[in-house]
């Protein structure tokens, strides 16, 4: 996937109980180095700060925490980050459904060993 420096990307976070969007986080593609793109969370007061007392003088903070950065190789796609808010919402719902499906599959595999109809081992060590 091709990205441009300065391009805005969105990440949607869903509410655990309702499944509705709880927040949208804005990321900006900042640099391309060594065959990788780097996107940074644009959060007022955390990564996007007032640089001086002058009106409208905002910019990137000098120290950006690791948890506010995403990276991907050139030609690949940022996981969960999309170019529009509606697309970010669809992606978040798709990722959530896939995660729930994996968890259900894992739960069913564990439950089959605990259920009365599952394999039973008698006290002499043989299966019945």
Image (tube, helix red, strand yellow):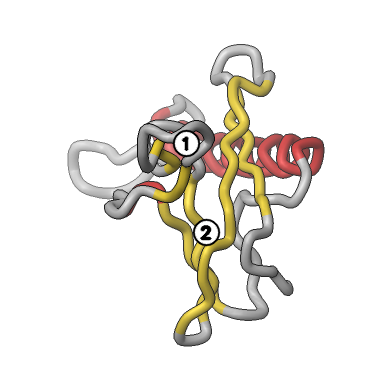
Residue found at the far left of this picture? 124
Q: Is mark 2 on a helix, strand or loop?
A: strand
Residue tagged by mark 1? 43
- Is 100 above or below relative to 28? above
Tell how many labels. Answer: 2
The quarter of the rendered structure image containing the N terminus is bottom right
x, y (%) of residue 69? Answer: 42, 55
Residue tagged by mark 2? 39
Residue drawn at the location 64% of the way across and 13% of the way down: 18
Q: Is mark 1 on a helix, strand or loop?
A: loop
Residue drawn at the location 67% of the way across and 51% of the way down: 8
- Is 15 above or below relative to 121? above
Residue 53 lies left or right of residue 18; in this view the side is: left
Res 120 quadrant in image? top left
The quarter of the rendered structure image containing the C terminus is top left
- Is 77 above or below relative to 124? below
Q: Which of marks 1 and 2 is in front?
A: 1
x, y (%) of residue 41? Answer: 49, 46
Res 22 quadrant in image? top right
Mark 1 crowdedness (10 Å alpha carbons): few <14, some 14-19, many ≥20: some
Q: From the viewer's side, name the closer residue of 96 and 4.
A: 4
x, y (%) of residue 75? Answer: 67, 79
**Mark 2 and mark 1 in contact (Cβ < 8 Å)?**
no
């Amino acid at each position: 996937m091709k990205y441009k420096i300065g391009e805005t990307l969105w990440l949607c976070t869903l509410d655990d109980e309702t499944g509705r969007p709880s927040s949208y986080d804005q990321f900006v593609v900042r640099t391309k180095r060594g065959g990788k793109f780097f996107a940074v969370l644009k959060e007022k007061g955390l990564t996007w700060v007032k640089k001086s007392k002058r009106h409208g003088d905002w910019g990137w903070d000098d120290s950006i925490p690791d948890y506010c950065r995403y990276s991907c190789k050139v030609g690949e796609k940022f996981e969960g980050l999309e170019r529009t808010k509606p697309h970010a919402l669809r992606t978040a719902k798709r990722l959530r459904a896939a995660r729930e499906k994996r968890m259900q599959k894992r739960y069913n595999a564990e439950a089959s060993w605990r259920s009365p109809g599952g394999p039973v081992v008698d006290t002499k060590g043989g299966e019945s």
